Image: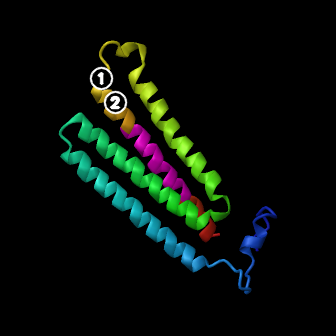
Amino acid sequence: MPCFLPPTLLPIMQTDTTEDAYDWDKLRNDIIIYQNELEKCDKNFEEMAHKAYSTAEMVESSDYLADCCQALAEKIIDEQYSKRAEDHKKALSAYIQAAYDISNIIYQTADVCYPRCGTMFIVIGNNTAAHKARTIVEDYIRALDALANL
């Protein structure tokens, strides 16, 4: 057992043959499933974005990505963080809302914008926020992958 691990991680590294032993193979399989589901979110977003003609359709594609990623993050939370799922979901929802708020502030309120900032900047702001939601899913997957490969 590596001696550089903090004492709190040592129980995770120990082999446990009891009924309560964590199913590492299932976790590794779940990670693959999550990665595949994230790829589906990306693919559908890209298809929607490329077909989008109006600003509303462009915003809709970004909103789809954010919603898809939030649903996937909530699935990961329910399955892998069940003991603190409600806390995670509240923080996730607040983070995504904050991402939308700050992205809209960044792209809509710069002094240089007036009177020029318009719908293009709404699309950019929403797209930025949606990709922040995607990044959270990547963070969850990375964290689980790191634990699965200790």
Q: Nearer the viewer, residue 70 or 49?
A: 70
Above or below 147: residue 48: above
The magenta stretch spans residue 139: yes
The picture quadrant where one finds residue 17 is: bottom right
Residue 90: image location, x then y, percent = 59, 48
For numbered disc 1, what is the local secondary structure?
A: loop
Q: Is residue 84 left or right of residue 112?
A: right
- Residue 24, can we see it? yes
Q: How is the image coloured?
A: rainbow
Mark on residue 122? 2
Q: How many marks?
A: 2
Which quadrant holds the C terminus?
bottom right
Give the extent of the magenta segment: 127-140
Residue 40: image location, x then y, percent = 34, 61
Which quadrant holds the N terminus?
bottom right
Name the kind of residue labelled 2 in the image. Answer: Ile
Task: Identify the residue at horizontal 45%, vertical 36% (top origin).
Answer: 100
The magenta stretch spans residue 90: no
Identify the main secondary structure in magenta. Answer: helix
Name the kind of residue labelled 1 in the image. Answer: Gly
Mark on residue 118? 1
- Residue 145, can we see it? no
- Report if the CB atoms under discs 1 and 2 are less than 8 Å apart: yes
In space, the residues marked 1 and 2 are separated at their CA atoms by 7 Å
Task: Identify the residue at horizontal 52%, vertical 58% (top origin).
Answer: 74
Residue 70: image location, x then y, percent = 47, 52
Above or below 126: residue 43: below
